[in-house]
Amino acid sequence: MQVRVTIRRRSEEVPEEFIYSVLMSALRMNREEYERIKNEDGSVSLYVKDPEALLKLQEIGEKHSELVEIIFEKGSAGGLFSSSIEAVKSNWGLAFSWSAVIFLLFLISLVPIIGFFASVLINVFIYAFIIYASSRLLKGNVDKVFRDLSLSEVFSKHMANGFGMWLGFLLISIGFMVVSLVLIFAFGALGGISDLMNYGKVKEGALVSVVIVFLLLLTVGMWYVYALPLLIGKLIEKGEPDFEKSFLAPFTLFKPSFIKETFSNWYLRIGGIWALGATAGFMGAVILSALIITIPVALVVLYWTNVLFAICSAESARRG
């Protein structure tokens, strides 16, 4: 499990270079990495997994306690909501840009023929943004990461990853539809539907079959949404992915070890918070979309759910 480490100066008289020397000594961090995660006040916040590096940081903190303060804290799923809100507030420009892209693509999706490609692009863009943001979160704290995120980088470097993930989920969706039809035939639900259409009534046994199939599909769908952050976490835990890894990632859903891990104690909290946030965010966005004047707010709410998704995915990668 990774531990969040925050290093800050005891006073402004302590040079920022001292913090860099601590990171270089304990983590072999180079200057470029240090500049990327450094906050405006010179402090840094990052996640460390290596036990030896953590021990060395602890020794440095004790030895130079008059110069720097080194804080160790295990990640808390309870802070995911507050972190996601702070992330949105840290870069309103990114929030409005993301919302504008989604809104524009949605309008284009209403146009015949080319609308299909716009609909696909919406999903590809969302996957690309999640992969991009969550992979960056593994290297720094939330506020710093979201202040530096750029949609131009999503389009220039990560759309291939988004397309790969979309394609993987498309194949799974097709397979899921086939399995659903097989289940409907197996439970005799089609017979019940036929009775309803031809005679205006449904036999009791057929009605029960329809309900069973519906509840089964609903359960699988709910588990799928719940497991998404862990899936993304597995994808990014070893660094930024490519098209092939992104394409294969959705098939992780079928691995027994993955299914088992979704019910582990540590993930129940993360997945539960994500599922609650996703449900509230989606319902809130739908309600707000009812009025034209509140559509911008609805888009920001959808953006927040994507931010929460990325944060939960990064947290899953750290704990896995």
Image (cartoon, grey):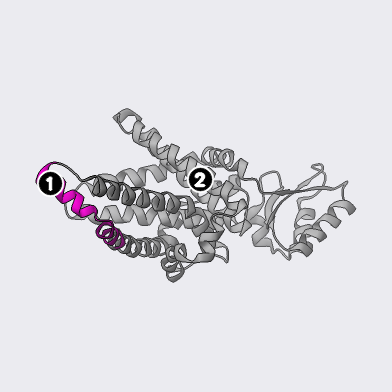
Magenta span contains residue 194: yes
Lower position in the chain sequence, tag 2 or tag 1: 1
Residue 297 found in image quarter: top left
- Residue position for label 2: 274
* Residues packed near mark 1 inside 10 Å, few (<14), some (14 to 19) or many (20 plus): few
Which residue is more in the foreground, 316 or 240?
316
- Residue position for label 1: 197
Numbered circles on residues, count:
2
User: Which portion, as a residue range, is magenta?
Assistant: 179-200
**What residue is rendered at 12% in x and 41% in y?**
200
Mark 2: amino acid: Trp
Instruction: Name the secondary structure under disc 1.
Output: helix
Q: Position of residue 235 (x, y in %)?
A: 51, 63
Whole-number angstrom distance, CA of label 2 to CA of label 1:
41 Å
**What residue is rendered at 47% in x and 54% in y?**
228
Residue 27 found in image quarter: bottom right
Magenta span contains residue 76: no
Instruction: Name the secondary structure under disc 2.
Output: helix
Image quarter where the C terminus lies is bottom right
**What residue is rendered at 63% in x and 56% in y?**
319
Q: Position of residue 93 (x, y in %)?
A: 46, 41
**What residue is rendered at 51% in x and 60% in y?**
259
Mark 2, mark 1: which one is toward the viewer? 1
Q: Position of residue 139 (x, y in %)?
A: 62, 57
* Residues packed near mark 2 inside 10 Å, few (<14), some (14 to 19) or many (20 plus): many
- Tell me the chief SS of the magenta region: helix
